Structure formats: structure tokens, C-alpha cells
Image (spheres, grey):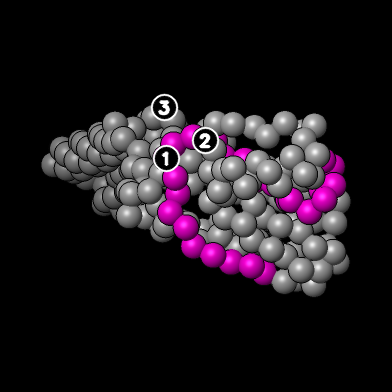
């Protein structure tokens, strides 16, 4: 019986040590994950953007993000049964006055050649796609130059930035990893103790009386 007790204690110590090692490994992985900086797409990255032009004189989405220098594949889908354009301004950090008339808007893009000027006919479901290199960091406005559409609010903004939007962050806090690791270690220890005590109890019942 003394040998069995010693064996049980050794088994418990081994399991407890394993559980502690497991918790340390999980915690170490959490620290490594938290300390690793987020990687941003390089200048040679390829990005895909989808925009829709609606019958309510809107672009959906009204803004999107690209990385400076990235190759951007843009697809603009026509959802209306009348013509639209997707005209992307080349002027950084500038907003076209909403009071501009169609003639003034036309003159603006005559003076400032747009990065893109895609036309969408009145066919619902028509897609006009192109590829371009994202410009230097900044905010660039895109509008519809069809008469009256921009004046009705049909515009949006392309954000060229190396910093992703905060809403896209999906990182898990370090404390979450630590809590999960400790909880798992505690569960392992409890299960090990129960199994060892049960095994010792069964051996005690099966031992012949002295």
C-alpha cells in the first residue's frame, strides 16, 4: 500500500507538472501573438474592391480602403436602369463642393485628370472592371458625373492608407489567451486528480484483506 501511495503521488505530480507546462506554453504563445506586429500589405500586394452604383444615386460602399502602391482590381456593378459613371479624383485630400453644377464638375475633371473614369450604361447587372495602382496616402473622392447625380449625393471616398480601419481589427486580447490557458490547465489537473483518486480507490477495494 505504501508503494501504491507513492506511485499515486508521483502520478499526480507528473500530471500537475504537465498541466503547468501546458499553461506556460499557452501563455507564451499568447505573449508571442500579442507582441508580433500586424503586417500590412506590401507595395506589391494585390487588392480587390467591389462597388455598386444604385438607382437611389448612391455608391455602395460610400468608402473603401486601399494600400498605397498596391495593385487594385476594381469592379463597379450597375444596379440602376439608367447611366452612371464612377469617376475617381486624382486630387488628394480634397472634397469637391456639393454646390458645383454639372458644368463646374465637368470643368473640375478637365483641369484635374481623374485616376479612373468608368462608364456604366443602363443595363442592370453590368460590371465595369479595371486595374490601377493605388496612389500615395490620402483620401480621394469618387463621384458620378452624370448631370444631377453628384448634386443628389452620389459620391464616396477612397482611403489610401497603410493603417487598416479599426473596425477590421480582429485581434484577441492577451488576457483572453491567458484566461483560456489557465482554465484549461485547471481542468486538466482536476480531471487527473479525479482519475488518480478513483484508481487508488479501486485498487484499495480489490486488495485482499491482510
Residue 165 image position (x, y, % from top left):
52, 36
User: Quick check: 31 above or below 155?
Assistant: above
Identify the residue position indicated by label 1 in the image: 136
Secondary structure of the residue carrying tag 1 is loop
Q: Which residues are magenta?
A: 127-152
Identify the residue position indicated by label 2 in the image: 92
Mark 2 / mark 3, whichever is N-terminal: 2
Residue 58 image position (x, y, % from top left):
78, 48
Residue 107 image position (x, y, % from top left):
68, 43
> In the rendered image, is residue 194 in sight?
no
121 in magenta? no
Q: Quadrant of the N terminus?
A: top left
Front residue of 164/78: it is 78
Classify mark 3: residues with Cα within 10 Å, few (<14), some (14-19) or many (20+): few
- Asked if marks 2 and 1 touch (Cβ < 8 Å), the reply is yes
Identify the residue position indicated by label 3 in the image: 175
- Asked if marks 2 and 3 touch (Cβ < 8 Å), the reply is no
Mark 1 / mark 3, whichever is N-terminal: 1
The quarter of the picture where residue 103 lies is top right
Secondary structure of the residue carrying tag 3 is helix
Q: Say the numbered circle drawn on residue 116.
A: none
Q: CA distance from mark 2 to mark 3?
A: 41 Å
Q: Quadrant of the C terminus?
A: top left
Q: CA distance from mark 2 to mark 1?
A: 8 Å
Amino acid at each position: 500500500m505504501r508503494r501504491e501511495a507513492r506511485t499515486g503521488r508521483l502520478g499526480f505530480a507528473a500530471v500537475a507538472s504537465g498541466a503547468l507546462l501546458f499553461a506556460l506554453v499557452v501563455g507564451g504563445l499568447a505573449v508571442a501573438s500579442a507582441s508580433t506586429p500586424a503586417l500590412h500589405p506590401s507595395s506589391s500586394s494585390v487588392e480587390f474592391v467591389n462597388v455598386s452604383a444604385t438607382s437611389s444615386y448612391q455608391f455602395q460602399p460610400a468608402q473603401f480602403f486601399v494600400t498605397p502602391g498596391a495593385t487594385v482590381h476594381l469592379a463597379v456593378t450597375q444596379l440602376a436602369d439608367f447611366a452612371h459613371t464612377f469617376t475617381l479624383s486624382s486630387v488628394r485630400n480634397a472634397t469637391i463642393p456639393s454646390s458645383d453644377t454639372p458644368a463646374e464638375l465637368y470643368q473640375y475633371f478637365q483641369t484635374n485628370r481623374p485616376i479612373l473614369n468608368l462608364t456604366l450604361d443602363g443595363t442592370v447587372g453590368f460590371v465595369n472592371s479595371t486595374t490601377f495602382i493605388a496612389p500615395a496616402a490620402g483620401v480621394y473622392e469618387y463621384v458620378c458625373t452624370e448631370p444631377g447625380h453628384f448634386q443628389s449625393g452620389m459620391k464616396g471616398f477612397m482611403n489610401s492608407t497603410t493603417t487598416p480601419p479599426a473596425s477590421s481589427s480582429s485581434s484577441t486580447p492577451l488576457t483572453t489567451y491567458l484566461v483560456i490557458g489557465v482554465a484549461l490547465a485547471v481542468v486538466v489537473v482536476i480531471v487527473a486528480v479525479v482519475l488518480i483518486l478513483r484508481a487508488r480507490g479501486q485498487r484499495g477495494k480489490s486488495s485482499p484483506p491482510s
